[in-house]
Every structure is written in structure tokens, then in C-alpha cells.
Amino acid sequence: MDIVTHGLLGAITAQSASKAGPIRSAAFAGFFAALLPDADVLIRSDADPLLVLEYHRHFTHALAFVPIGALLASLLLWPFLRRHLSWQAIFGYALLGYATAGLLDACTSYGTRIFWPFSSESFALSIIAVVDPLFSLILIGGLIAAWRQRNPTWARAGLLLAGLYLGLGAVQHQRALDAAEALARDRGQNPERVQVKPTMGNLVLWRSLAVVGNTAHIDAVRVGLRSSRVYPGPQAQLVDPSIWGDLPPDSLAYRELHRFYRYSDRLLIAHPRDLHFIGDARYAMVPTETAPLWGISIDPDHPDRPITFEARRELTTEKRRQFLAMLRGTP
């Protein structure tokens, strides 16, 4: 989730457990602690472009790490809050705030290793986008009301509404998945995997990806109040890292492609206008397109050259028009 919403959820969660007097200090502690897990973005290396992916939403977001993260947050908060809160209170509010980060990220579609070190699998409910203004506004409303009135009841109400919104996301996810699976049946397909992920900022338009053999069928599903609508998209050949580009097995490019393959849930496609740019098939600016949002550039003729990792967020006027048309449900 975006960093601001993380802070808002941490703050309102701490407020909901606070009494009237220290409610503002509690919000500050919860807000700060909820930001700390995303310090994992600092784990990066110019010599290893994929290191940032390896540790993104890794141990800092794990439930087992929450007490340690809360302790670190408390140590940083102590000089600022010691006149307002006891050490135990600071730690308690930081614990609540820190815990929300991994749980909220697990609700998004990228994947979070919340059960590390007991499991290395990434957990993703895919019930909310990484940026959702309505969800953030719910948190802001409860947070501000509790702050101004010094009444934790407002925070609890905001937290309840936020939980209901996530519940709505779960319902919408299932409806989108049902529509995607029905589409596959209508096509006479028996896909090995079907995934649906919310598009940016809403719970109405979803990107559907059905894997049949080594082909990804990419479509958009709009889930309205009463009915669903499918926007058929293209097919894309999935990249098999063992044979792509005839890379030597002992080459740097071969190893890094396999590594990126794991980080991308084994769903890689080549950019349609740059076949040497291999990206994550799960994400695109428009839900029916095959141009991935991010990926790695590999030169098969020089397999031991360092790879580059880059994001390609190409939001043109035409793409914006297509996205809004599907969001509104127009042809």
C-alpha cells in the first residue's frame, strides 16, 4: 500500500486503543511505526538490481518481526514522546502501528512474506489496490474526528468502516474471479491458473490473467453493482527462463532471469515493443495490455553483462481514455 495510507492505518489503530488524554500522541506513535517496515526499500545495491525486489515486503513485514520492529520504533520515538507517554505505552502503540503494515500489504496483490521465517511464500489476498483513495479517505475521516474530539470512538468507527471496505474488496475479488473463470469456460479453456487483481484506485475494474499452457490470456473484468462485464484482451507468450534467448546456464543473465521469474510468481512476458525487456505479466497500466509495468533488460548476445531493472509506467492519453472507459463500463 502507499506509504501515507500505511501511516493513516497505523495512527487510527493506535488511536482506537488509546484513552482520550494521550490520543494524539498515540496517533503519532502508530503513524511512525507503520512507516518503518517500508524502510526495506533502502536494501538495494547498484551491483545487484534485483536485491530491492528480493527484500521488498520481506522480513520487515513479517508477523514474527513485529515485536522487533516495534522496539526499534519505540527507541526512535522515545525522545519525542517521553514527556507524554510511558515507555510501555509507546511500545504498545508502536506495536499496533507496526503490525498493520504487513497485514495491509498482504491485502494487496503484490505479495508479502508475513509468515517468514516459517514460510518463504508471498501472501497476497488481492482485495485492494496499492493506492485506493476511498480507503484512505475513510481512514482520514476517522483519524481527524478522533484527533479533534479526543475521542477514540471515532477511530474505532473509522477502523470498522475500513474493515468493511476490505470486506467489500473480498466480495468484488470473488465476483471478478468468477467472471474470469466463466470466460475461460466459454472459450473452452481449462487454465492451470486464473488470477484477478484490482486496478489502480478502485474495486470495480480488475485485470484477469488465465494461464493455459505457456500462454497468458489477459482480459479486464468490470464488476458493477448488479452485473459483470468482460473486456477481452490479447494473449501473450509466457517466458520460460530455461530456454529464453538460448542463454548459457552459467551466465549472469540466465541466473538473474530465473531469479526474476521467482519474484514474479513465474509469470513473465516480453514487452511487445522491446522483446529484450522481460516483465512481470501481472501488472500493466491498462488491464488489457501486455506491456508490463516493470521488468529487466537482457542482451542475449552479451549474457554476462549486468542486467538493468526498470519501471516503464507509460500513461499516454489513449491509455487513460481506455482505462476510464472500462472503469465507467462503456464499450
Image (cartoon, rainbow, N blue to C red):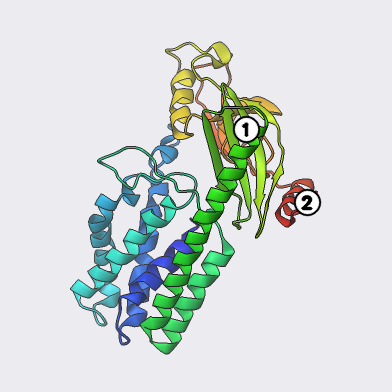
Say whether residue 152 is visible: yes
Secondary structure, mark 2, is helix
Secondary structure, mark 1, is helix
Residue drawn at point x = 27 percent, y = 82 percent: 84
Residue drawn at point x = 63 percent, y = 41 percent: 284
Residue 117 point in image, percent of width and height: 26, 41
Pointer 2: residues within 10 angstroms few (<14), some, or many (20+)?
few
CA–CA distance in space, label 1 to label 2: 30 Å
Amino acid, disc 2: Arg
Mark closer to the observer (1, 2): 1
Residue drawn at point x = 48 percent, y = 55 percent: 1
**Relative vertical location of residue 186 with respect to residue 128 in this rendering, above or below:** above
Q: Which residue is mark 1?
A: 185
Front residue of 166 and 62: 166
Does residue 215 appear to the left or right of 17 in the view shown? Answer: right
Pointer 1: residues within 10 angstroms few (<14), some, or many (20+)?
few
Counting residues from the N terminus, which is met first, the one under dot 1 or under dot 2?
Answer: 1
Q: Which residue is mark 2?
A: 321
Residue 257 point in image, percent of width and height: 49, 24
